[in-house]
Amino acid sequence: MTFHRDVVGAIGRTPLIRLRAASEATGCTILGKAEFMNPGGSVKDRAALAIVRDAVQRGALRPGGVIVEGTAGNTGIGIAMVAGALGYRAVIVIPDTQSQEKKAMLRLAGAELIEVPAVPYANPDNYVRYSGRLAEALAKTEPGGAVWANQFDNVANRRGHYETTGPEIFDDLDGKVDGFVSAVGTGGTLAGVGMALKERNRDITIALADPPGAALYAWYTSGALKSAGSSVTEGIGQNRVTANLDGAPVDLAYHIPDEEALPIVFDLVVNEGLLLGGSSGVNIAGAIRLARDLGPGHTIVTILCDSGARYASKLFNPDFLREKNLPVPAWLEAKGRAPR
Ligand code: PMP
């Protein structure tokens, strides 16, 4: 008999999936690690679990304790799921401008929501700063303790990827991997996987794929934190070197506009049966660029972060795409099934 004792046991050990068109176009083997198959539906389940386990080991979190985070996205869902499975409470602080779908999704995942005004980081009521303060206050009153997940600067995040995601990639390929590419939200994935792979073989090329509006492409290519433009992708696009990113072994960086990333996402639905979110498109575009730089015959891995189902009303909505001046695939306009 084989089973997981709880849902947390089902996090990780995701499969690698060959991306056919990207591989054929480059003569390389381009593989996506299917993080959308995690039980909470994204790569962030790993960070959530690593952060909670770290807090428990440090003695900061005890049965019934509270995990607080300021987030509107996948991390909140991951934390709510891990908290529910392991007997903790999840309190998620979000800006009140977030969509009803996101709030509903977090509530359904089991989180207690606190909505705050959408104000910049400089304002003490900003959702991230609010969540830090709230965790500090609750830590004094909650019998089970309270911790601030602090995903950007808590390096338990990248340690989770260093201990699981990176070794899984290397072992599944018997070490035959030449490159790894990832976009950055917190930097946990890029740094953790990059460090694990470099430690096993320092010839493996580690590359950043950065959307417009983020400052890290400029940082890695010219040493200045500079950004321009914007992107409709969610969960990625960082403007500072987070503690998680600090020291990441990044060899190359690519700047990936939405016009390059989104057609890849749309083609994968029609031709390869894969429904992915926008950050996966940025990642795959980065993998194609790295494949061209390394030349044919190489094996390159990237991350399929979450499912396109999470973005039905945005990326897969022709009105939204038109409003953003982005190309609308013909099949998305047509009623009924996507043509092959
Ligand atoms: N894609 C999506 C959809 C995400 O939610 C995130 C996390 N914010 C990322 C990519 C980036 O992952 P990381 O935080 O490990 O850099």
Image (tube, rainbow, N blue to C red):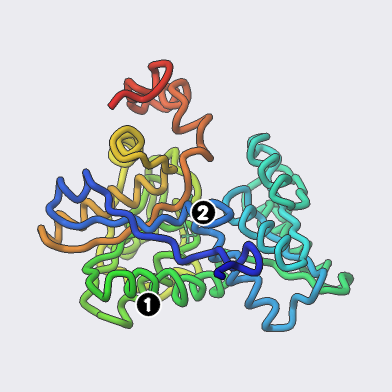
User: Which residue is the site of mark 1?
Assistant: 196
Residue at disc 2, CB closer than 8 Å to ligand 1? yes
Residue 67 visible to an observer of this rendering: yes
- In this rendering, the label closer to the viewer, 2 or 1: 2
Query: Viewer-proximal residue, 61 or 237?
Result: 61
User: Residue 340 placed where, x, y %?
Assistant: 28, 27
Is the N terminus in the top left, top right, bottom left or bottom right quadrant?
A: bottom right
Residue positioned most to the front:
1
Name the image quarter holding residue 54: bottom right
Quick one: label 2 or label 1, which is nearer the N terminus? 2
| Location of residue 187 (image quadrant) | bottom left
- Give the vertical position of 7 relative to 273 (above or below): below
Q: Amino acid at mark 1?
A: Ala
Residue 9, given in percent of the width and then of the height, sits at 59, 68
Residue under the image location 30 percent in, 50 percent down: 284
Q: CA distance from mark 2 to mark 1?
A: 20 Å
Q: Residue furthest top?
A: 335
Residue found at x 43% / y 58%: 184
Residue 82 in which image quadrant: bottom right
Mark 2 near mark 1, Cβ–Cβ under 8 Å? Answer: no
Judged from the image, the secondary structure of the residue bearing numbered disc 1 is helix
Residue 216 visible to an observer of this rendering:
no
Residue 113 picture location, percent across and down: 76, 49
Q: Nearer the viewer, residue 21 or 119?
A: 21
Coordinates of residue 324 in the picture (x, y in percent):
42, 27
At 54% from the left and 64% from the top, the residue drawn is: 11
Kindly identify the amino acid type of the residue bearing the numbered disc 2: Ser
SS type, badge 2: loop
- The image's mark for residue 24 is none
Horizontal side, residue 326 vs residue 317: left or right: left
Q: Which residue is mark 2?
A: 42
Crowdedness near tag 2: few (<14), some (14–19) or many (≥20) residues, C-alpha within 10 Å: many
